[in-house]
């Protein structure tokens, strides 16, 4: 039973503390769209998406108005396209035609982004997977709303280093083809280890093959709410700190649960999961880095940052998991540089480096996210950074990811503007020592010994 105190408290979190539902993401299976004829595949995909998702945006807007809860994005995720187009696509250009179809369908139904232009290659690549991966630069250059992801490793399979090497090249090529927009295409491309099937957040969302025909997943976000709560217990013990985060995460997640249930009922599509992630925005007061400072750091990146982030991540999960029937996706705290004003400030102050961010990814939700690097960074260096991040995910049995943006024509210290939720970022220095001989070895890094649990 919801009482008037809880209603007033939620209203305050929305109006004063930047609480929002970051996304309602409709997952759609495209497996029934498979055909040997490429034109038919494209027709089937367009028809399926525009039919199933026709009421998604209007439903989201209705819930916003009815409950007064901001829903920032309405999105779609689809079955990894390498699986859907494999029978019909005989070259990378064939896959690009599917990307254009996805973009056209996304425009038609009015969603912000559509994810699932993806391949799952943690143990090896089929010809179809390779064609899709090689098509990514063109696909992202020729579309507006399509997002792409490639899973190159897992705890069970190890790391596919052939795919890691290729992704370094693909990221650089994507940067070149979108350099007129400050290499924006790379902001829509994520490289994963242990990618979840039900992640509602872009750019890494796809609809896993273990999912139902269609599903509603919701991502909530409330860094500002957590920071405000912690201001009330400044200087208190770790026990009080942890209890405060847990209670706040519970309240935030309840809002997401309400929205998910209403959307599911109105669309007559099953409710999948709530993703508990604290996802920041460039808005003042909506920063994960600010929470770390409220815990007691001068800047994100100062000594103690990894411990503070581990504490935050764990308490968010402990509080949120009790507030929802189903929790999934990534769930924790995101640390994207360009999307978090506190992270940007820390980089500009010299407190936060790429190496410190990598250490922080050992305990956070995702990984090296929305980080701008010099445009002349070598593709093998990018592959080495990916390999490091994939190893963290593989060994720690968690999801990790890399979304690096080598901004063509710009160097360390310059600022790049992406706009909207993607924000802006100072270009960060990258270790200049080479790893070519390592990256250019063929094959895969084996799964760790603790992966054998059968």
Image (cartoon, grey):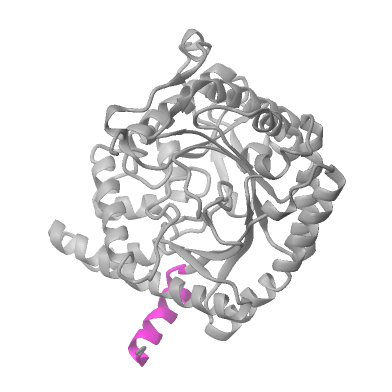
Magenta residues: mostly which secondary structure?
A: helix
Residue 362: give x, y in percent of width and height: 33, 38
Q: Residue at x 33, y 88 (%)?
A: 5
Q: Nearer the viewer, residue 253 or 105?
A: 105
Q: Residue furthest bottom?
A: 4
Residue 346: give x, y in percent of width and height: 40, 41
Q: Is the N terminus in the top left, top right, bottom left or bottom right quadrant?
A: bottom left
Residue 453: give x, y in percent of width and height: 28, 38
Instruction: Report the label total.
Output: 0
- In screen coordinates, is 274 left or right of 106? left
Q: Residue furthest right?
A: 39
Q: Nearer the viewer, residue 448 or 77?
A: 448
Say if 337 sits above or below 17 in the image. Answer: above
Q: Residue at x 73, y 42 (%)?
A: 85
Q: Nearer the viewer, residue 13 or 453?
A: 453
Say if 11 sits above or below 445 in the image. Answer: below
Whether residue 227 is visible: yes
The magenta segment: 3-19
Q: Residue at x 34, y 64 (%)?
A: 226
Q: Residue furthest top?
A: 437
Residue 258: give x, y in percent of width and height: 46, 78
Residue 14 shown in magenta: yes
- In screen coordinates, is 357 left or right of 416? left
Whether residue 350 is visible: no
Residue 229 shown in magenta: no
Q: Is the C terminus in the top left, top right, bottom left or bottom right quadrant?
A: top left
């Amino acid at each position: 039973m919801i009482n008037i105190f809880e209603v007033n408290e939620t209203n305050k979190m929305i109006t004063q503390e930047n609480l929002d539902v970051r996304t309602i993401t409709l997952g759609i299976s495209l497996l029934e769209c498979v055909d040997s004829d490429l034109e038919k595949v494209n027709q089937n995909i367009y028809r399926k998406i525009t039919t199933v998702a026709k009421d998604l945006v209007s439903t989201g807007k209705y819930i916003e108005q009815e409950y007064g809860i901001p829903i920032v994005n309405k999105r779609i995720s689809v079955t990894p396209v390498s699986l859907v187009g494999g029978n019909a696509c005989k070259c990378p250009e064939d896959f690009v035609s599917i990307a254009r179809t996805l973009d056209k369908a996304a425009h038609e139904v009015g969603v912000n982004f559509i994810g699932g232009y993806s391949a799952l290659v943690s143990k090896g690549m089929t010809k179809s997977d390779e064609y899709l991966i090689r098509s990514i630069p063109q696909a992202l250059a020729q579309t507006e709303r399509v997002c792409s992801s490639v899973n190159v490793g897992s705890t069970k399979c190890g790391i596919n280093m052939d795919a890691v090497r290729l992704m370094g090249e693909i990221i650089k090529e994507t940067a070149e083809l979108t350099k007129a927009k400050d290499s924006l295409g790379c902001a829509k491309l994520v490289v994963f280890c242990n990618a979840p099937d039900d992640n509602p957040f872009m750019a890494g969302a796809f609809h896993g093959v273990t999912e139902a025909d269609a599903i509603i997943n919701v991502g909530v976000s409330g860094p500002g709410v957590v920071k405000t709560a912690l201001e009330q217990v400044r200087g208190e013990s770790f026990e009080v700190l942890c209890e405060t985060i847990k209670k706040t995460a519970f309240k935030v997640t309840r809002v997401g649960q309400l929205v998910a249930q209403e959307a599911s009922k109105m669309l007559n599509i099953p409710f999948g999961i709530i993703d508990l992630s604290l996802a920041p925005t460039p808005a003042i007061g909506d920063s994960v880095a600010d929470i770390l400072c409220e815990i007691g750091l001068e800047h994100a990146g100062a000594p103690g940052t990894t411990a503070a982030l581990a504490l935050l991540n764990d308490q968010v999960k402990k509080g949120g998991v009790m507030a929802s029937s189903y929790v999934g996706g990534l769930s924790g705290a995101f640390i994207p540089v360009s999307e978090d004003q506190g992270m940007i400030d820390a980089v500009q102050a010299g407190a936060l480096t790429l190496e410190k961010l990598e250490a922080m990814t050992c305990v956070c939700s995702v990984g090296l996210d929305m980080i701008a690097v010099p445009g002349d960074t070598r593709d093998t260096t990018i592959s080495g950074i990916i390999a490091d991040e994939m190893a963290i995910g593989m060994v720690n049995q968690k999801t990790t990811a890399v979304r690096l943006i080598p901004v063509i024509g710009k160097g360390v210290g310059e600022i790049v503007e992406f706009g909207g939720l993607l924000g802006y970022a100072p270009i960060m220095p990258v270790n200049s020592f080479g790893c070519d001989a390592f990256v250019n070895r063929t094959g895969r890094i084996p799964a760790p010994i603790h992966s054998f649990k059968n």
